[in-house]
Image: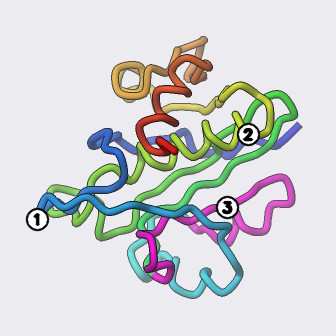
Amino acid sequence: MAKQTKFPLGIEIDKLTNSIVNTISGDSFPTDVHPFSKADLKNVTLKNGWLFKWSNEFKQSDRQVFKLSIQNNPTIIQGLLSISDLKDHFYLNLIESAPFNLGKNKLYEGVPGNLFAFTCKTSWKKGYQGFVSFTSKSKLVDHYEKTLGATHVGGNKMIIFPQQALKLIKRYFPK
């Protein structure tokens, strides 16, 4: 079984979109999710404003790290996530929006929802019916219930069940 990350998820779902939306123009941009590579590590650092040390996640053998980018612009990372395959569902270890997508002056909305939807899609493709679990910060349990339809199952543990997973998948990946 995967060792769970010591960080409960503390990212707020700013808006459920169907891609990511530029907060200035209101334009919607389709996205791609790709495996995070060693070459990406040089730009994703604490010094560059990222909140977590992603090199630690990248080194864990029981995890896969993915990056979200706008289609045809894979070099600018909009957000990251780390997931573990627990053989009957995926556990979301860590998720983070790029520094320029945080706070009231963020450039794009929809990044966290997009990454949660990708995790549900990955779970569905693997035959796990979209099941995803994660650990939430206490103050965000209600938020994840309302925005993602996640179910609080005790402590700070949360699960996204198939019906809610399918809603997220259809919103972000309609094809």
Dot placed on the residue nearer the N-terminal end, 3 or 2: 3
For residue 40, what is the image quadrant?
bottom right
Q: Nearer the viewer, residue 95 or 87?
A: 87
Say which amino acid is labelled 2.
Lys
- Magenta run includes residue 152: no
**Relative to 58, is 19 above or below?**
above
> What is the CA distance from the residue labelled 3 to the residue labelled 2?
17 Å
Q: Do the residues labelled 3 and 2 touch (CB within 8 Å)?
A: no
- Residue located at (62% from left, 62% from top): 66
| The magenta segment | 53-75
Q: What element carries label 1?
A: loop
Instruction: Check disc 2 and report the residue beneath it.
Output: 125
Say which amino acid is labelled 3.
Val
Q: In the rendered view, does 120 fall on the left or right side of 116?
A: right
Nearer the camera: disc 3 or disc 1? 1
Q: Where is residue 93 in the image (x, y as percent from the top left)?
A: 65, 45
Instruction: Check disc 3 and report the residue beneath it.
Output: 65
**Relative to 128, is 95 above or below?**
below
User: Total label count?
Assistant: 3
Q: Position of residue 149 (x, y in %)?
A: 44, 20
Dot placed on the residue nearer the N-terminal end, 3 or 1: 1
**Relative to 142, is 44 above or below?**
below
